[in-house]
Structures are given as structure tokens and as C-alpha cells.
Image (cartoon, coloured by chain):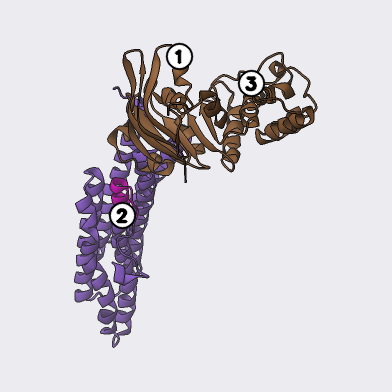
Amino acid sequence: MRETRHAFHDELDSIELEVLAEGELAERAIGRSVAALVTRDADLAREVIAEDDAVDERYLSVERRILEVLALQTPVAGDLRRLSAILHINLHLERIGDQAVNVAKIFLSVQDLPPGGTILSHLNEMGDVVRAMIRTALASLRDRDLELALSLPAMDDPVDRLNLGMYREVAKLAADPEMLDWGLRMNVLARQLERVGDNAVDIGEQVAFLLTGEFREFTDASHPELG
Amino acid sequence: MTSLEVKKLDAWFGKTQVLKSISVAAETRSVTAIIGPSGCGKSTLLRCMNRMHEEVRGARAEGEVLFGDRDIYAPGADPVVVRRQIGMVFQRPNPFPTMSVIDNAVAGLRLTGRIPKAELHQRAETALRAAGLWDEVKDRLQEPGGRLSGGQQQRLCIARALAVEPEILLMDEPASALDPVSTLRIEELIAELKGNYTVIIVTHNMQQAARVSDSTLFMLYGEVVEFATTQKVFTNPEDRRTEDYVTGRFG
């Protein structure tokens, strides 16, 4: 037997490499945005905002290439699942890039306000975990590793917990109007990182679909008892 | 409900075995597609389904092909009767070129006995309507069949097969000699025929199998590799060889 659609399958491989590269950029952007916040580095925050163009460029390129392959090559079976999964993953990664920009912008909007140590350390921890989640999600795609993909919901638990606890931490700042103002923005910022965790879990769901042919949500917010 | 069930069917051309223990069942009023590379035995399987295979010198088949509760290979089964109930449409449109359109439509029916002229006309109209051809030829019924376009000629052959009121229609690459528009017209017709007939189609065109069929049988080297819903075969096939074939990883 001989390979009959060599160029087509090379193109699929190349599209996947591009989305993985996009994922590395998005993961780096999240790391740098949280670092800018924690080290109060406004220049770094502005760099994160400027560098999002590189994520967007890859996002658009992957989208265009997938549409072209769908139109011209009528992929089926594993090829079709691969393209469908990458199409969704591409969107999640672009969103992660946008969340990094949001983190940077929120920091820049409050850089003159006094920060609170506990909240910053919680946000730093959330940043570390969601970065690890993005790396895990990308590795599960690259290595076709179902177990890695399935490990993502458990990784997301501390992120959700820290995000929910943020409200209480902010309430502790109520006595000082300036601190409270900063804290309320940090509550919004925590929400951005929490979304990144969700995006990583969603990428894991797409990888599981690619590998098993069955799509199911790892967690269902409207039916938590099934999770 | 099952219309046609093949059970452990073997077939040979001379000493060469071309089908090996094939088992497959076609649901009533559904479309089953048979796909596979050239020489895999798909046309032979189709031709075993109405006893056309044995028309080739040295060709024979062993096993069961159940039509309802009758084995069409049982001793005493009449191949002519079998072929009336299980019709066949071939790759190249083969109307009688000088015979009129209307006579072509009922050419098979005429062989079944004497039928009054008025009834013949009515049966021709019914068959031509079922084949989606009536509106295009109703003012040209006396013209020779050979003057119709390729796509119309193929639908005329489908009408001819339908006129004898079969239960099952076998189609051996019915659109491979047609242009893209005529091909889509035939595919649409297959979807309509499904309302009244069980259709089994052999096609080289995998996308055609995906578009028209409910179930897909993938064959390789005279054997069944996978038989499943078409949706399953084209999104998440069970067998690695099916995956490799439908995604073009070998050919």
C-alpha cells in the first residue's frame, strides 16, 4: 500500500505545528502579563499588548488554512476530526492571548494604586497553574496523550478555588477606598486567569474528541453532579 | 427490517477466489454503499446479489443471499424472477439507442408477459416519473432513447429497471460516466428512491458514498473490513484500514 495524499497530509501536519506555535506564544504572553503585574513592570505589560499581534496572525493563518483544506480536500474520519479539533483549539488559544492583553491592561489601569500582598500572591499562583495547564493541553495534542488531556479538569480546581476566594480577599480591603478600588480590578483580573484555565480544559476536550471520536464536556457547569 | 442478507458468501472466477465469506445485510428502504479499491470484489458482490455473477463463464458463488426468507441461490430459484425483483443499473447508460423513450422505459416489463397498451403507457409514465425524467421527456416520448443526454439516458435505464417493480435496486457505479451536474441529479434521485426501494450502490467516489448512503461497506481483497453507518465510517471508523482508505493514506 502506498500513501496517496502526501501533500494534503503534510499540510495537516504543518497546520498543527502552527497552532502549537501559537499556543506557545499565548502561554508565554500569560506568563509575562502576570509577571508584569507582580513586578509592577509597565514596560513589560505594554510589550505583552504589542506582542498579541503575533498570536492573532497565527490564529488568522490557521483559520484560513483550515478553510482552504476543508474546501479543497474534503477531509474525512481522523483527518476531519483533527481539523475540527484544531479549528476549536485555535480559537481557544486566540482567546488566551486576549486574556493576557486584558491582564496587562488591567494592571496598567491600576499601576498607581497600592497593591495588596495576599491578592498578588494568589494571582501569581493562578498564573503559574494556568500556564502549566496550557502547556499540558498543548502536550496532550502534540503527543496524542489522552491521559494528559483528562488530567486538565483536576488541574483547574485550584484556579477556580482561588478565583472564588478572591471576592473575600477584596472585601478585606473595604476600609481603604484606594485599596478597594485596586482590589475590585484584581477581582476582574482573576476572572481573566480563571477563563484561561477553562480554555485549557476546552482544548483538552478537543484532544479527547480527536483521539476517541466521542465529544463530551469534561465538566458541565449546568450539571455539576455529572462532572 | 432487512431486505437482503448475504451470509458467508464465497465467489470465484475460475480458480481465483474473489469473495471470501462475505456477510452483510441491507436494511429495507435504505441506501447501502459498497466502497473499496479496484479489484476488491465490490462489483462481484453486487452481481452476486441478483445472480448476475454466474453469467460470466467460469464464475460461481457459494453461500446464501437471503431475499426476505428465500435464498436466491437455493436449488430451483429462478434467476430471471430474482432479477425482476432485484434490479440492476450499470455504469454506462445502455438504453436501446433506436428504440423510443417510452418503449425503452417498458422494455423489461414487456418481457414479463402481455400487458395492454394503455397499461403499458401508464406504467412507463409511473417509472419515468419515479426516475425523475418524466418532465424532461414527456414531449419526446417517441424520440429514440439514444438522443437523450448521458444523464437522461442513465435515468431512462433506472426507469426501465423500476418499471418491473423490483424491491431492490442494485447500482454499479451509476454516475461514473456522467458529468458533475448529472451526477448530482442521480444522487438526488437515489435519495428519493429510498422512500420506496432498497438501494445498494457500488461507487469509486467516496464522497458520493458519504452523500447518498445510510450504511457503508468497506471491502479489501475480497473481504469485508468494516460495515457500519456511513456517519461512523466517515467520522470515526473502527478499523485502521478503513481509516487509511477513506483518508487516502493508501490507494
Whether residue A156 appears in this view of the structure is: yes
Observer-nearest of A48 and B222: B222
> Does the residue at mark 2 contact the one at mark 1 (Cβ under 8 Å)?
no
| Mark 2: few/some/many CA within 10 Å (<14, 14-19, 20+) | many
- Prevalent SS, magenta region: helix
- Which range of residues does the magenta coloring cover? A203-215
- Which lettered chain is shown in brown? B
Q: Name the element at disc 1.
A: loop
Q: Is residue B63 above or below residue A161?
A: above
The residue that label 1 is drawn on is B56
The residue that label 3 is drawn on is B150
Query: Is A208 within the magenta?
Result: yes
Q: Residue at x 33, y 77 (%)?
A: A184
Q: Residue at x 74, y 29 (%)?
A: B120
Observer-nearest of B128 and A183: B128
Q: Residue at x 79, y 30 (%)?
A: B118
Residue B156 horizontal/vertical position (percent): 66, 25
- Residue type of the residue flagged with mark 2: Glu
- Chain identity of mark 3: B
Residue B247 horizontal/vertical position (percent): 36, 33
- Chain identity of mark 1: B
The residue that label 2 is drawn on is A205
